[in-house]
Amino acid sequence: MARQEESVYVPGIALPQVPAGAPTVGVVLEGGGFRGMYTAGIIDVWMERGFTATATVGVSAGATFGCNFKSLQVGRTLRYNKRFCGDPRYASVRSLITTGDLFNEKFAYGRLPWELDVFDVDTFQANPMRFTVVATDIETGEPVYHDLKLGGKEDIEWIRASASIPALSRPVHLDGKLLLDGGTADSIPFDWMFSQGYDRCVVVCTQHAAYRKEPNSLMPFLRVRLHRYPKLVELLANRHLRYNAQRDRLAALEREGKVFVIRPSEPIELPTMVKDPALLEKVYQLGRHDAEATFDAMTSFTR
């Protein structure tokens, strides 16, 4: 990825106005850890250009970064990740050892959104866009879809649950359930979005078109570490099969004109932990580039 333009921040985005009688639009945001910076670039361009959705569903990084699509905070995802990606208080092996969470609960989901780069709760509440996150019930192996309406601390806990990586995070207790990463049960929830009855569906993927997921090489470790949750272990063991089948089904729907898909125009290769802000900037700029390149076609599809 050669693009290294400086990031863009546009404050004070007004609530988008949707014309009366316009088709309803559902947006699906895949996860993928720091590949989610690609999604951040996409939605920042959308917000700058006044595009909105009736509903958005985010998984894992699609939830943590996608919530800014509802709060209309252009540039926030890139800004705080570049500022804190090298900070051990944000995400580190030290945090994993001392707390059980690679991404530190108190810092990443506490101080950061409420003190250091404040999440705009008022705009989140005022924006009529429906925003849903996906988590995995690790006892049943079923996906859990939960609407976020207030943007407060409980909603942030749901976002944390959606993004909590198995074996690298403690289960999150919410609504009587033990929850972890939503991508484990439903990586790209376009089927759920179709079930909601919206007129149009736009999907943002974080893997390029030729990508195929391979079997998880860490399964022997995961079977031992997560043995108390056999349904979760089963999901992890066959996730590559379900993910590849899901992508094939999505591609078929795309060919039939039933969904608009945006994918990285070149492969994104990032480690689980990224400490170099320049790498995040590159992925973000790729998202911006692809958003601009697809914007006219996407808006034509959603009209």
Image (cartoon, grey):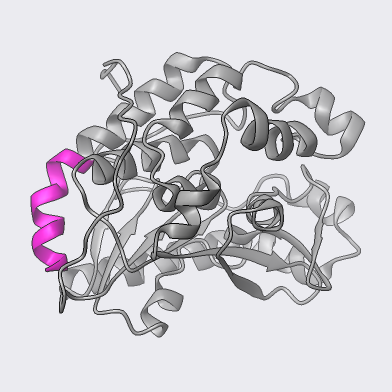
Which is more toward the observer, 277 or 146? 146
Q: Which residue is drawn at 38% across and 43% down?
A: 39
The N terminus, quarter of image: top left
Which is more toward the observer, 249 or 86? 86
Q: Quadrant of residue 289?
A: top left
Count of numbered marks: 0
- Residue 100 seen in this snapshot: yes
Q: Give the range drawn in magenta.
A: 291-303
Which is more toward the observer, 291 or 215? 291
Which is more toward the observer, 237 or 232? 232
Q: Residue at x 64, y 72 (%)?
A: 144
- Provide residue 32's location: percent of width, then percent of height: 51, 45
Q: In this view, does 78 lie above or below 123?
A: above
Q: Which residue is drawn at 33% across and 45% down?
A: 43
- Provide residue 132's location: percent of width, then percent of height: 51, 65
Q: Which residue is drawn at 70% across and 28% down?
A: 91
Q: What is the chief secondary structure element of the magenta stretch?
A: helix
- Provide residue 58's location: percent of width, then percent of height: 49, 58
Question: Does the magenta-highlighted stretch encompass residue 292?
Answer: yes
Q: Along the horizontal axis of the image, is 175 left or right of 122?
A: right
Q: In which quarter of the image is residue 239?
A: bottom right
Q: In which quarter of the image is residue 11?
A: top left
Q: Is residue 260 above or below residue 85?
A: below
- Provide residue 128's location: percent of width, then percent of height: 39, 65
- Residue 269 seen in this snapshot: no
Question: Does the magenta-highlighted stretch encompass residue 46?
Answer: no
The C terminus, quarter of image: bottom left
Q: Along the horizontal axis of the image, is 105 left or right of 183?
A: right
